Image (cartoon, grey):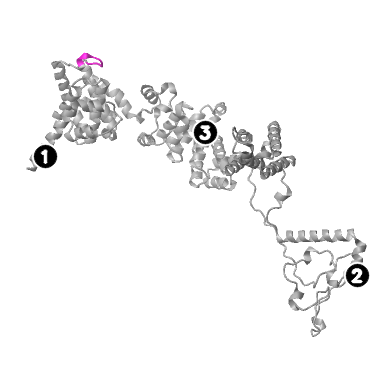
Amino acid sequence: MLGNIKFIGELGKLDLIHESILHKCIKTLLEKKKRVQLKDMGEDLECLCQIMRTVGPRLDHEKAKSLMDQYFARMKSLMTHKELPARIRFLLQDTLELRENNWVPRKAFIDNGPKTIIQIRQEAVKGQNQHYHAQNQGHPSQQQAQSKDMQPRFIKKGQLNADEISLRPAQSFLINKNQVPKLQPQIPTMIPPSAQPPRTQTPPLGQPPQLGLKTNPPPIQEKPAKNNKKPTPAKEELLKMTETIVTEYLNSKIINDAVNGVREMKAPKHFLPEMLSKIIICSLDRSDDDKEHASTLIHSLRHEGLISGDNFMQAFLNVLDQCPKLEVDIPLVKSYLAQFAARAIIAELVNIAELAQPLENGTHFPLFLLCLQQTAKLRDREWLTDLFQQSKVNMQKMLPEIDQNKDRMLEILDGKGLGFLFPLLKLEKELLKQIKADPSPQAIYKWIKDNISPKLHTDKGFVNILMTSFLQYISHEMCLTEGDEQLDTPSKEQLDQEKQLLLVFKPVMQKFLHDHVDLQVSALYALQVHCSNSSFPKGMLLRYFVHFYDMEIIEEEAFLAWKEDISQEFPGKGKALFQVNQWLTWLETAEEEESDDDAE
């Protein structure tokens, strides 16, 4: 828990968490839980002290002074309770003193780090001088009396200078280990006087005596390491730098200079969305060519690894939030934003699903449709259709709640020129009208060829709509409607008419179903749903199964695959199997007998 509080505190110190959340954390830690004794609150209070030390300076301002006073009054009262461990009480006391000291830590916290050799020497000299002066000032007469009776080696040497202290042994000690420790070192008489090192002279009155030979090397002057890292510029300065870079780039069109300028800014990660927002806004009131160049700059920054797709989406939403203000001067701001989004989709900076998520339920409607329009304009319809189908976006959820139905959706898409995204919806709406206008196989096939992409001819959804339209037309021609008693007991004329209409549509069915067992299974599911919608009239499903088999529209393998398939997508499978199970058993047995005959 303490680690999480430290993390929250550091986020708060960086202004990544709102003050209200920090106050809520503090209140939670201060509250005494029910059925929890005071002595068990140690962990909460330790976390409280930690978060106060981290974000206390940020929260302790005029607006929140009353709250902070209440917090610290509560902490002061808790500090006096003997039930709490001593460590927790001292932590509370340290935190209270920290606030009283205007959030400036004690010296112990400042000097607790490593020290340089120079600092250690200076502190040693300072401590020695203080000790020396204290003794001289305290009992001068007593010291003089003692110094006469004491051996020279016990007499205090006086204060030291930082330059005369060395961490290595004295040179005199290295020359002769047997010398007597006197102020003047013993020098052998065999050394000629010219080669003897000079003796130290008696220092003037009032100056401390020198220790040993003046041969110690000067102390190494360690320079503190220079911090070449420049502080991060303020937000306003970064925005001005961004505006300057964008303006110069849009005037010169030199992309490398702009990218290098952004790189040299060294903007923190949390500023990147605002930087991209500034790039977009700076180009909104300029020409379409400049907007395209601004998009190119954004994509180049992504290519160089300076921004991410998430940064772009945050910037996009930031500009959207400013739209009411921007529309005063730039009425078509949403259309211009749609251009940026479309180019981002084409450049794979974001995908359609990521763009759609924050715009669901008609948020900023019709911005999402404008983005698709611009994408189709910049690329082509077929490319966009494939990309949209891969995204698995539910288009109905992208509309306002009042328009979230198929008919209204198709109407809106047609109005925006985006009906091509849902060709099967158009097929479902128009095919039955076409069949009623001209039920001949040639006319039906020509209409499908002219209006439906060949890629969809092998789509299960296409086959489902095709079979559903044929079955609805046959029921309409037989004057059979849902709830009609004739559905269970059709006349002989109606049964003959049903068979004749199936024979009319047989060439079209065979054209799209021949040699495609999976599509034939889809056709059987369409028949199952049609019967389910009519409450499974007695004998209807079995009649169609027999007709499809006799007319060689559906193969034996497809019937058996439909029987074994388990799917919850289409309603009524259990009742359908009950009606045709005996016939399917016969079909399976007949197929096995044919296999045995072929083997013999």
| Residue for point 49% across, 32% down | 336
Q: Is residue 30 visible?
A: yes
In this picture, is 164 found above or below 335?
below
Label 3 vs 1, first from the N-terminus: 3
Q: Magenta residues, as a range? A: 480-486
Q: Which part of the image, by quadrant, shows the N terminus?
A: top right
**Foreground residue among 262 and 256:** 262
Mark 1 crowd level (few <14, some 14–19, many ≥20, 10 Å Cα): few
Identify the residue under disc 3. 317
The reply to whether callout 1 and callout 2 are in contact (CB within 8 Å) is no
Which quarter of the figure has residue 63? top right
User: Three-letter amino acid code at disc 2?
Assistant: Lys
Which numbered circle lies on residue 595? 1
Label 1 vs 2, first from the N-terminus: 2
Q: Is residue 293 visible?
A: no
Which quarter of the figure has residue 477? top left
Left or right, 472 with respect to 322, comes to: left
User: Three-letter amino acid code at disc 1?
Assistant: Ser
Q: Secondary structure at mark 2?
A: helix
| Residue for point 49% across, 34% down | 288
Q: Is residue 481 magenta?
A: yes
Label 2 vs 3, first from the N-terminus: 2
Q: Which residue lies most toward the top here?
A: 485
**Foreground residue among 97 and 249:** 97
* Residue 391 position in % (x across, y down): 39, 36
